[in-house]
């Protein structure tokens, strides 16, 4: 099975970028290299969120590690255009979405039968992700459908939270996240369905732009949801949105700092 699925060119998906034009060993050179942010930023985020992981939820680091897996899987897929590469890419995205949902999905939207129990909610999501993983090898289109079901409510919940936000710093980050996510989706759609037009403009790299934009919007969305998770579920914690390396420069790398209350005393973490 691996000999067939792992063979270069077995994936039914082929993006606009010409194949093997830069290197005889890499099918889509620019699409492959454009995954660099998935490998570069997560280690920095693991460091920046070390206190969040210690005092709020250590599961935040699982999301950053899974983003690295997404980057590696996507690079392998675009380098080979193999079916196994496509499946690994899609499954990595599925699992990082499932992990983020299980950690950050607002309890007010939980089904009543769960009684606000996040552990049960996470278990149900894990089971669904496992089922979709198995079905993917039977019918790859199942995974794309599952991803669509996860992405749409993420965008809706994010936009709803932004509209009600009073902190201008959070509002501006939310607005940028929604804008970048919208641009990313437009790039994906144009490259997927309007390839002839894109080729006519002599810029067949919109899918590479999708990689960069979707990473930026995905990790900033996780930062926002991490902030809201503290605000809604941890009475003795206060989330503070900060930027690295300079806090006053809002185009830096955002992260969430934690202030804790112990015996009516506030301590910065």
Image (cartoon, grey):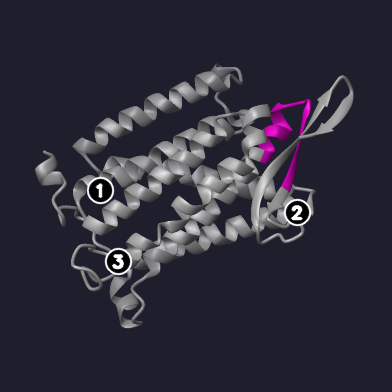
Q: Position of residue 247 (x, y in %)?
A: 75, 55
Pointer 1 residue: 85
* Badge 3 element: helix
Which dot, 2 or 1, sits closer to the camera?
1
The answer to whether residue 2 shows anywhere in this view is yes
Which dot, 1 or 3, sits closer to the camera?
3
Pointer 2 residue: 169
Mark 1 or 3 closer to N-term?
Answer: 3
* Badge 1 element: helix
* Badge 2: residue crowd in 10 Å (few <14, some 14–19, many ≥20): few
Q: Position of residue 191 (x, y in %)?
A: 35, 67
Q: Is residue 50 magenta?
A: no
What residue range appears in magenta? Answer: 227-241
Q: Nearer the viewer, residue 46 or 230?
A: 46
Q: Position of residue 95 (x, y in %)?
A: 40, 36
Q: Position of residue 93 (x, y in %)?
A: 39, 43
Q: Residue at x 49, y 46 (%)?
A: 152
The C terminus, quarter of image: top right
Labels 2 & 1 near each other (Cβ < 8 A) = no
* Badge 2 element: helix
Q: Nearer the viewer, residue 16 or 30?
A: 30
Residue 254 shows which numbered tag? none
Q: Residue at x 39, y 40 (%)?
A: 94
Mark 2 or 3 closer to N-term?
Answer: 3
Q: Nearer the viewer, residue 18 or 266?
A: 266
Pointer 3 residue: 29
Q: How far separated are the C-alphas under marks 2 and 1?
A: 39 Å
Q: How far separated are the C-alphas under marks 1 and 3?
A: 15 Å
The N terminus, quarter of image: top left
* Badge 1: residue crowd in 10 Å (few <14, some 14–19, many ≥20): many
């Amino acid at each position: 099975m691996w000999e067939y699925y792992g063979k270069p060119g077995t994936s039914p998906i082929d993006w606009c970028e010409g194949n093997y034009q830069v290197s005889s060993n890499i099918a889509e050179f620019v699409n492959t290299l454009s995954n660099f942010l998935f490998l570069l930023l997560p280690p920095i985020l693991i460091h920046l969120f070390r206190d969040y992981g210690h005092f709020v939820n250590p599961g935040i680091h699982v999301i950053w590690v899974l983003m690295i897996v997404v980057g590696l899987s996507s690079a392998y897929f675009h380098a080979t255009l193999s079916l196994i590469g496509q499946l690994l890419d899609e499954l990595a995205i599925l699992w990082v979405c499932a992990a983020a949902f299980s950690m950050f999905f607002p309890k007010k939207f939980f089904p009543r039968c769960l009684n606000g129990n996040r552990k049960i909610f996470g278990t149900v999501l894990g089971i669904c992700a496992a089922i979709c993983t198995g079905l993917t090898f039977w019918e790859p289109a199942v995974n794309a459908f599952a991803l669509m079901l996860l992405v749409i409510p993420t965008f809706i919940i994010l936009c709803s939270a932004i509209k009600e936000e009073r902190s201008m710093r959070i509002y501006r980050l939310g607005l940028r996240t929604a804008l970048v996510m919208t641009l990313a989706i437009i790039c994906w759609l144009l490259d997927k369905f309007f390839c002839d037009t894109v080729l006519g403009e002599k810029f067949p790299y919109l899918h590479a732009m999708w990689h960069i934009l979707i990473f930026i919007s995905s990790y900033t969305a996780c930062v926002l949801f991490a902030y809201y998770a503290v605000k809604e579920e941890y009475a003795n914690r206060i989330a503070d949105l900060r930027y690295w390396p300079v806090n006053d420069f809002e185009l830096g790398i955002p992260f969430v700092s934690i202030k804790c209350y112990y015996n009516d005393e506030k301590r910065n973490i």
